[in-house]
Image: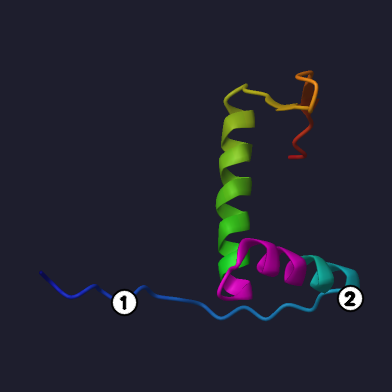
């Protein structure tokens, strides 16, 4: 088996309002992510996928506890 090629990375520094940092930290804890970078990478993958589906004309629906479907508006 060949050794894995290192992935090129770019360091990004963010300044967040306190509330945004709290949300980021909460997501890190809820998802048991190893780092803030992992939370952000996962969020970007999800957002990119949602935008791709919306661009293809698809819609996102959520089902509530009683089984009703509610359209979720994805902001592009």
Q: Is 68 placed left or right of 56 in the picture? A: right
Q: Closer to the camera: disc 2 or disc 1?
A: 2
Tag 2 near tag 1, CB within 8 Å: no
The vertical placement of 39 against 11, above or below, is: above
In 3D space, how far apart are the residues under numbered discs 2 and 1 (Cα atoms)?
34 Å
Q: Residue at x 62, y 38 (%)?
A: 50
Find disc 2 in the rendering and name its residue: 18
* Quadrant in which residue 58 is drawn: top right
- In magenta, the rendered stretch is 24-37
Find disc 1 in the rendering and name its residue: 6
Q: Which residue is drawn at 79% across and 18% down?
A: 68
* Quadrant in which residue 42 is drawn: bottom right
Closer to us: 28 or 15: 28
* Quadrant in which residue 72 is drawn: top right
Q: Which residue is drawn at 55% across and 74% down?
A: 34
The vertical placement of 57 against 16, above or below, is: above
> Residue 64 at x, y = what percent?
79, 27
Circle 2 Cα neighbour tier, 10 Å, few/some/many (<14 / 14–19 / ≥20)? few
Residue 54: numbered disc = none
> Residue 40 at x, y = what percent?
62, 64
Color encoding of the figure: rainbow
What is the quadrant of the C terminus in the image? top right
């Amino acid at each position: 088996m060949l050794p894995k090629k290192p992935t090129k990375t770019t360091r990004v520094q963010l300044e967040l309002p306190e509330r945004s940092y709290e949300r980021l930290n909460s997501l890190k804890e809820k998802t048991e992510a190893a780092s803030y970078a992992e939370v952000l990478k996962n969020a970007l993958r999800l957002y990119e996928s949602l935008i791709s589906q919306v661009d293809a004309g698809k819609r996102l629906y959520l089902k509530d506890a009683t089984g009703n479907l509610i359209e979720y508006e994805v902001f592009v």
